[in-house]
Amino acid sequence: MALHLLYESASGYALFQAHGIDEIGQNTEAVRSSVSDLNRFGKVVKLMAFNPFESALDALNQCNSVSEGIMTDELRNFLELNLPKVKDAKKAKFSLGIAEPKIGSHISEVTKIPCQSNEFVLELLRGVRLHFDTFVKNLKPGDIEKAQLGLGHSYSRAKVKFNVNRVDNMVIQAIFLLDTLDKDINSFSMRVREWYSWHFPELVKIVNDNYLYAKAAKYIEDRSMLAEDKIPGLTDIIGDEDKAKEIVEAAKASMGQELSPIDLINVQQFAQRVMDLSEYRKKLYDYLVTKMNDIAPNLAALIGEVVGARLISHAGSLTNLAKCPSSTLQILGAEKALFRALKTKGNTPKYGLIFHSSFIGRASTRNKGRMARYLANKCSIASRIDCFSERGSTVFGEKLREQVEERLDFYDKGVAPRKNLDVMKSAIEITQNKDTEMETEELIEPSTKKIKKKKSKSAGAEDVDAMAIEAANGKTEESKSEKKKKDKKRKSDEEQSKAEDKLNGFNGVETMEEEAIKKKKKSKDQGVEELQATGDVKKKKKKSKE
């Protein structure tokens, strides 16, 4: 039976034919020895066809399809063109050697080409990969390495690209850092206690909290300088006035040794570092809570942010946790105890990381195993909802938490819990109602904006109309006022003329006499002027005669 080899390179698909396999034998060790020798391997394996990729994007799509076990149209056409046709009734006289069994099953289903993937074929493909640049002509020495590097970068970048807000790697790193910070803060605070106790040993018994102890040690500094005026500051730090007074009294009769100023400065600096670490731990916890509400809101609502983050970090990712069955999730974190029990044939553990949940602590010793199994079941449901749902909501997590509470009541008091089907139906209804509300709000927002615009336009038009009306009213009022003023002036003029007429009526005789006197004066003046003019004319005549 003839053997053909399909090699998926970074630059394209290549089809090889293996001749004379009997020369090197079917043994894998013989193939390994012959792979390194190009002369021997080149006689056995020969290139039949090569189909280069059109672009880098095409190469990425082909690589993604091969990794997912899907045969593309380009690959199908390439195989059908270069391989002999397979008849339905007869058996094929050849087989196709493939590195990926997934894509081989898909090829055999669609094209009926028999495919095989074993150690012998893998060794032959290893030799093809080693001497590929010699088989394909017109290839420069660095072309294959460049194509492999570019395709590797684009493939990994495409795999990493997903929702940034739902990156569970941040949760894994945060919970690891939170655990290490807890250990470091605990060890550092114990070192501060031991160091400062040489100077003020009585403070350890009065202040139990590590953070408050570091704060008090930094505030007190030298115990000999501690007086009653520092009691308000101590009460602000510790939160209890009686304890502050007790610290002041203990400092007066302390059995500790005196420390030099340099030693006290070093103690204060170390106490400040411990305080900074504890404050950063609080901020990191808040960050973890927000990230868990973004990534796995239902799991966080069911079991808590810290326990949920520990489950995700132990599984490796949220998708890995969603793939785990509830029985695996139940003992996640107790692998050593499980394998020890299997080895010694003892009792297997009932819970792992899930033990830190408050539900198992509240259950009785008899029901702890049952509660762990039930809680693991609900956690697996919540993790799958968080992993594969498009919109994150805490509805399912809250409903699952209610179910766990009901199961606790059932174990303790015998109250029958609700059925899982009814609870899930109510959760789905709530989510559907929320989705409809969101859609209606999204539809209402643009309509309200349009209405506001229309209102603003109508208000503007109304304002213009009002201004025009006011202007018209103003003009009419002005015209009316002007008419009134003119009427008043006319009336006043008429009254004045009437008054003058009356006065003229009383003084009519005097006016007539004055006019007659004026006329007489004018006539006299005219006569005098005429006489003067005639005298001047006579004088001029006499002078001319002489």
Image: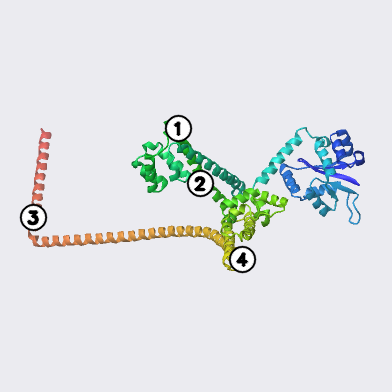
2 vs 3, front mark: 2
Q: Is mark 2 on a helix, strand or loop?
A: helix
Q: In this view, does 374 lie to the left or right of 10?
A: left
Question: Could you tell which of marks 2 and 1 lies nearer the N-terminus?
Answer: 1
Q: Which residue is drawn at 52% across and 43% down?
A: 186
Badge number at residue 514: 3
Q: Where is residue 238 in the image (x, y as percent from the top left)?
A: 42, 46
Q: Residues within 10 Å of mark 4 (few under 14, many from 20)?
A: few
Query: What kind of element bears circle 3?
Result: helix
Task: Kindly identify which numbered label has been placed on residue 263.
Answer: 1
Label 2 is placed on what type of residue?
Lys
Spatial separation of the CA atoms under disc 3 and disc 1: 131 Å
| Residue 370 in the image, given as x and y percentages of width and height | 63, 60
The span from disc 2 to disc 4 (Cα, nearest Å) is 38 Å
In contact (CB < 8 Å): disc 2 and disc 1: no
Q: Give the residue type that dot 4 points to.
A: Lys
Are the residues at dot 2 and dot 3 in contact (C-beta closer than 8 Å)?
no
> Which residue is nearer to you in this view: 388 or 405?
405
Snapshot quadrant of residue 224: top left
Residue drawn at point x = 88 percent, y = 33 percent? 39
Q: Provide the residue designation for mark 4.
A: 425
Identify the image quadrant of residue 3: top right
Q: Where is residue 438 in the image (x, y as percent from the top left)?
A: 55, 60
Q: Residue 282 carries which label?
A: 2
Q: Earlier in the sequence, mark 4 or mark 3?
A: 4
Foreground label between 2 and 4: 2
Determine the CA span between mark 4 and mark 3: 124 Å
